[in-house]
Structure formats: structure tokens, C-alpha cells
Amino acid sequence: MLRRTLLGAVGALALLATAVPAQAQEYDIALISKGFQHQFWQAVKAGADKAAAEFNAKVTFEGPDTEAQVDRQMDMLSAALARKPSAIGFAALDSQAAIPLLQQAKDAGI
């Protein structure tokens, strides 16, 4: 599921880039991971940064210090929503806790 979510975020970034002319506005993509400790997340960040440069997008990548910090991750998701990004990539530590915020994102068309 995590891989599918991340691939979806990268795919969305690619679609946004090909759907608009080069002079179009820059897209804002918020990526919220489960953390930074694992090499996987470091590779995801590197890939997101590379794609952002290639497709004229602003990508923010953040995650809690540990995978036990569900509340911190929810705070990050809430802050990202307040920014009204073009898209959000999210790897939930607790999918049930994230439902209300993800519903807000859906309702906002994010």
C-alpha cells in the first residue's frame, strides 16, 4: 500500500507536469512520510527532489523523527492542508487517525 501511495504521488507529479505548458504555474506537492530513518525514505526524498526539478514543482518532504510519533505526523498533515497544496503524498502511520484529515483534503479537492 505504501509503495502504491508513493508511486501515485510521483505519478501525479508527472501528470501535472505534462498537462500544462512550460510557463504555467509551479505546483506545490506536500509529501509526508513515516520518517527519515530508513534508507527507503531517503531514496523517496531524493527521487521527489529530482522530479520536482525536472517538472517545475515545489515539493516539501517531511516526516516525524520516529514511526511512533503519530500525533506529530497528523500535525504535519494538518499544516500541509492549511497550505492548500496542489497534491499530497501521504504514508500514514495510523490510517484510522488520518481519516478526518484525508477527508478534509478530499473535500478541498486536493
Image (cartoon, rainbow, N blue to C red):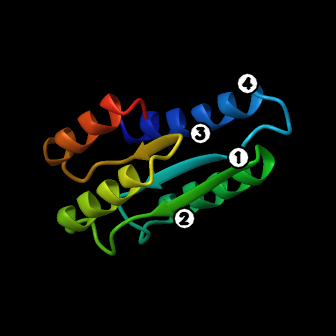
Residue type (three-letter) at the residue carrying disc 3: Val
Residue 42 bears which disc, if any?
A: 2
Q: What residue type is labelled 4?
A: Ala
CB atoms at circles 3 and 1 under 8 Å apart? Answer: no
Q: Nearer the viewer, mark 2 or mark 4?
A: 4
How far apart marks 2 and 3 lie (CA) works out to 15 Å
| Occupied quadrant, residue 73 | bottom left
Whether residue 79 sits left or right of residue 43 in the image: it is left
Q: If you read the primary sequence from the N terminus, does the residue marked by circle 2 or circle 1 appear first?
A: 1
Disc 4 to disc 3, C-alpha distance: 14 Å
Specify few, some or many for label 4: CA neighbours under 10 Å numbering under 14, 14-19, or 20 or more.
few
Residue that badge 3 annotates: 10
Do tag 4 and tag 3 residues touch (Cβ < 8 Å)? no
Q: Which of marks 2 and 3 is in front?
A: 3
Residue topped by disc 4: 19
Picture layout, residue 12 above or below residue 65? above
Q: How far apart are marks 1 and 4 (CA)?
A: 12 Å
Disc 2: CA contacts within 10 A as few (<14), some (14-19) or many (>=20) = few
Q: What residue type is labelled 2?
A: Gln
The local secondary structure at tag 4 comes to: helix
Which is nearer the N-term, disc 2 or disc 4?
Answer: 4
> Upstream in the sequence, badge 4 or badge 3?
3
Residue under label 1: 26
Q: Which residue is drawn at 20% across and 62% down?
A: 70
Q: Can you tell which of label 3 and label 1 is closer to the viewer?
A: 1
Closer to the chain start, of discs 3 and 1, is: 3
Total number of numbered discs in the rendering: 4
Whether label 2 touches label 4, CB < 8 Å = no
Judge the density around disc 1: few (<14), some (14-19), many (≥20) Cα neighbours within 10 Å: some
Front position in the image: 83 or 91: 83
In space, the residues marked 3 and 1 are separated at their CA atoms by: 15 Å
